[in-house]
Image (tube, helix red, strand yellow):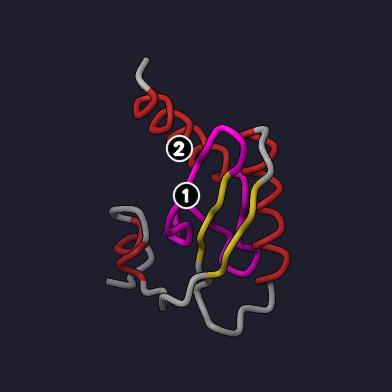
């Protein structure tokens, strides 16, 4: 397996692991909602960027920490998390989910 394939496999696994992190206000996981905007994975560290569904999400600290902890446990390397400034909208949800909610 090449290094690029390994990173891709680890990133896919990370996205699966992060499906455990549920937004308590909406009841959907952060991957379904499209909140994880990127992951930079190295052999000795990782960095995840995510956004919230609203700028003043009351659960932001909890979601950020749960995401960091879940990623770190899955990857087994120190992980940092960053809250991105991108504004969330329903089109970021996994395909078909926004339709199911009547958002698009």
Residue 1 place in picture, x, y as percent: 37, 15
- Location of mark 1 (residue): 39
- Location of mark 2 (residue): 11
Residue name at image x 62 percent, y 69 percent: 25
Residue name at image x 61 percent, y 44 percent: 20
- Look at the image and say whether residue 92 sits in the magenta stretch: no
* Mark 2–mark 1 CB contact (< 8 Å): yes
SS for callout 2 = helix
Q: Give the image quarter of residue 12.
A: top left
Q: Give the image quarter of residue 38.
A: bottom left
Q: Which residues are magenta?
A: 20-45
Nearest the viewer among 61 and 47 is 47
Q: Give the image quarter of residue 75.
A: top right
- Look at the image and say whether residue 24 sits in the magenta stretch: yes
Q: Is residue 94 left or right of residue 14?
A: left
Residue 52 place in picture, x, y as percent: 53, 71
Mark 2 or mark 1: name the one nearer the start of the chain: 2
Packing grade of label 2 (10 A; few <14, some 14-19, many >=20) is some
Nearest the viewer among 35 and 83 is 83
């Amino acid at each position: 397996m090449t290094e690029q394939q390994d990173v891709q496999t680890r990133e896919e696994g990370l996205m699966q692991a992060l499906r455990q992190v549920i937004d308590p206000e909406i009841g959907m996981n952060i991957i379904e909602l499209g909140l994880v905007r990127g992951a930079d994975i190295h052999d000795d560290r990782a960095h995840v960027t995510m956004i919230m569904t609203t700028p003043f999400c009351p659960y932001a600290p909890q979601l950020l920490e749960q995401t960091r902890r879940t990623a770190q446990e899955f990857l087994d390397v120190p992980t940092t998390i960053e809250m991105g400034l991108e504004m969330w909208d329903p089109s970021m949800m996994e395909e078909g989910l926004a339709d199911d909610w009547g958002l698009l």
